[in-house]
Amino acid sequence: MSFTAQDRPDVVLIGAGIMSATFAALLRSLDPSLSVVAFETLDACGLESSQAWNNAGTGHAGNCELNYTPQKPDGSVDISKALEVNNQFDLSRNFWAYCVRNGWVKDPASFIRLCPHMSLVWGEKDVAFLKARHKAMSSHHCFEGMEYSEDSATITKWAPLTMHGRDPSQKVAATFYRGGTDVDFGALTRALFGHMEATAQITTFYRHKITSMAREPDQRWRLTAKSQTDNSSVTVSARFVFIGAGGAALEMLQAADIPEARSYAGFPVSGQWLRCDDPSIVGQHHAKVYGKAAVGSPPMSVPHLDTRVINGRSHLLFGPYAGFTTKFLKRGSWTDFYRSLNTKNILPTVQVAEDNFSLLKYLVQQITQSSNKRFSSLHAFYPQAQKDEWKLSIAGQRVQIIKPNEKNRGTLKFGTELVRSADKSLVALLGASPGASVAAAVALQVIETCFADRLSDPTWQRRLHEIFPIYGIDLKNDAETLRANRQQTGEILKI
């Protein structure tokens, strides 16, 4: 039997979201000869976590997310995590600019727009924290231009809805970063897959669910996917497998049965938004305004009042309100969580429940709160909000990582993590925030670790520097290069 590139592809992608789209586009740009096949359970690409209504759409760059800048016991603020995310977002800007220059994305305004990033706090303690945070961040060239104010008139100019009707005696402070962005990751996913499919750079099987995955004698991966339309099956033999399936990544990783992942488990968290579509209200707010998270809440539940531009129309979102569900995907099954448990990961899962009582309490409170209670949290950001102007909207699912720590006790991780097989022939992306915003950095990390033997190739090195002009440069210590690069990518992306 003879095999085509489709039967024996170099690379198989499981999931057709922003992570798979970014990795495939990067890999094909480095080596156009590689054959790539993707399997997606749903009808089209980018319909789960990448879909615009299912995420915050913030180009996470560490400008406004207060959970990235913890305060130390001495009162100073640690900005190292914010710097890391900030530089990862610069890699995303580089990659997106490359895609626009080379026609992969026709119009950058279809997925990215300027939208100021703000942090807003109230009360003596939080105002003191934000002031210390601004001092630490604004002194670094990565965050130059970030403004700070405790003046109500200035904050009103930045974000009118947050101040109108607020008690004038309340002590308030805000930071304002003009160069923030709003990103439609669903639109970007569709553009990347659309280009690759139209130019025969990828073969995508939609409505196909992976039903088996196993090693072959030659160490390739044999995958079988079943059609959700007619129950037919497709079987391929792949040299490399990338699992970017969002909430389904853990299930796929378990199906691969690699030793490196046998103790991993997942903790699903659901989300809801309050959404306003009224142009007379939406038109008064143009910013992403982040506040402080409630004690015990997961990072993706940091409250924010966001401008969103989706399909060319502006909206306001507030939230997200967290909850617990046993689904791993928005369109998943209530049995997802239970089916993920096994003899290897059930103890770490129980230990996480024991050690995170405050989180469980918070989630129960979120699930059981009344609509009036839910709306009262919006009033803290938008004092004159009227209930009939907002409607409840369901956000996407997030699955947090559970894994043993160095003491072999289960711990809950809130970031993103790559899990690889020992021979680096399979990698899965687990976790959530900052997620899509740093997809290019994640894809580059996969290249550096799983395709390290190709990096000595002069052609790959040349192409890497074409895609990422800042590749190999520490932007935290090179202000001149950072400024020049942001100027260049800003012009291409029209931001």
Image (cartoon, rainbow, N blue to C red):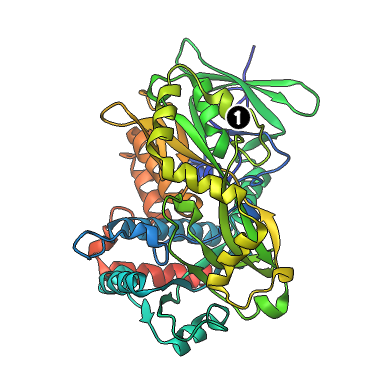
Image quarter (top left, top right, bottom left or bottom right) of the N terminus: top right
Residue 9 visible somewhere in the drawing? no
The residue that appears at 62% across and 38% down in the rendered structure is 329
* Image-based side of 324 in relation to 471, left or right: right
- Residue occupying image coordinates x 55% and y 39%: 246
| Callout 1: SS | helix
- Residue toward you, 305 or 262: 305
- Frontmost residue, 196 versus 76: 76
Q: Amino acid at mark 1?
A: Asp
Say which residue label 1 marks. Answer: 336
Q: Is residue 470 left or right of residue 251?
A: left
In the displayed orientation, state which residue is furthest to the right: 230
Q: Residues within 10 Å of mark 1 (few under 14, many from 20)?
A: many
Residue 308: x %, y % from top left: 61, 66
Q: Quadrant of residue 482?
A: bottom left
User: Does residue 317 lie above or below 264 as drawn?
Assistant: below
Q: Residue at x 39, y 74 (%)?
A: 123
Image x and y of residue 470, in percent: 34, 58
Q: Position of residue 431 (x, y in %)?
A: 46, 41
Q: Which quadrant of the view contains residue 143?
A: bottom left
Left or right: 415 in relation to 32: left
Residue reaching furthest bottom? 153
Between 17 and 302, the residue placed more toward the observer is 302
Say above or below: 47 vs 379: above
**Percent of width and height locating residue 120:** 44, 72
Depth order, front residue of 21/370: 370
Asked if 312 appears above or below 80 in the picture, the reply is: below
Is residue 477 in view?
Answer: yes
